[in-house]
């Protein structure tokens, strides 16, 4: 397992494509710590073959050790695959230790799930402070702005969610597990849970919920 500490500052990642792994702009595995400051992720894609996660940034750590700080970063028009496997148009976090996202913008990012940010896996602490999410889209699942699933703690404050769309939880979708969810001084404006009444291929009826926020099967 690597002990690398990585710092990225004032870097532009523009129209990069991940062909076989996630992270159209940047992918991190098996490092100890990373900070990304005052940078731009624009028009990156993770849409081909096995590359369907984290069009802007993908951080994956099966050991749960990586800590990442994102500050003053713009994620614009990044696209993870829009089919069922695509997750995290701007950022995808899986099984890491901690992520702090501050003073950043997520504008027009797309994925099947988690259009702006997606975080999955036990033990993750996600801190979101003073970010703006506008016009991000989750095409087949939850979390047009933010999707958190089976993580330990999600803290969101001083942030704006505007005109994001998803099947459920267009602003924030929080699903499953013993998650502590704290939302403070946040505005949800004109977000939309689309396809409010629909039937699947087996003719089961579905009613979608959570234009601003959807919370499902969490215990805290």
Image: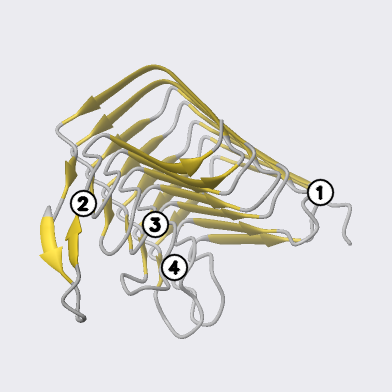
Q: Residue furthest top?
A: 185
The Cα atoms of the two marked residues, 4 and 2, are separated by: 34 Å
Measured from the top left, where is residue 158 in percent x and y? Answer: 41, 17
Q: Which residue is mark 4?
A: 16
Of marks 4 and 2, the one in the foreground: 2
Q: Which residue is mark 3?
A: 89
Circle 3: element type: loop
The Cα atoms of the two marked residues, 1 and 4, are separated by: 25 Å
Q: Which residue is mark 2?
A: 208
The mark nearer the N terminus, 4 or 2, is: 4
The mark nearer the N terminus, 3 or 2, is: 3
Category of crowding for the residue at label 2, using alpha-carbon neighbours closer than 10 angstroms: few (below 14), some (14–19), many (at least 20): some
The mark nearer the N terminus, 1 or 4, is: 4
Q: Residue at x 41, y 68 (%)?
A: 86
Circle 4: element type: loop
The colour style of the image is secondary structure
Circle 2: element type: loop
């Amino acid at each position: 397992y690597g002990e690398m500490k990585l710092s990225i500052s004032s870097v532009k990642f523009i129209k990069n494509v991940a062909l076989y792994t996630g992270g159209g702009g940047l992918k991190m595995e098996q490092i100890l710590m990373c900070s990304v400051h005052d940078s731009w992720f624009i028009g990156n894609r993770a849409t081909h073959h096995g590359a369907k996660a984290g069009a802007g940034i993908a951080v994956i750590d099966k050991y749960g050790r990586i800590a990442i700080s994102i500050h003053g970063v713009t994620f614009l028009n990044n696209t993870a695959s829009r089919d069922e496997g695509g997750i995290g148009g701007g950022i995808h976090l899986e099984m890491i230790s901690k992520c702090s996202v501050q003073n950043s913008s997520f504008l027009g990012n797309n994925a099947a799930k988690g259009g702006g940010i997606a975080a999955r896996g036990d033990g993750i602490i996600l801190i979101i402070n003073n970010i703006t999410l506008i016009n991000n889209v989750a095409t087949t699942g939850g979390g047009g702005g933010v999707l958190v699933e089976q993580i330990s703690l999600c803290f969101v404050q001083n942030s704006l969610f505007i005109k994001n769309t998803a099947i459920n939880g267009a602003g924030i979708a929080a699903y499953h597990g013993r998650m502590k969810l704290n939302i403070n001084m946040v505005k949800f404006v004109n977000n939309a849970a689309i396809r409010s009444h629909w039937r699947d291929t087996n003719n089961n009826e579905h009613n979608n919920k959570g234009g601003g926020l959807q919370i499902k099967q969490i215990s805290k």
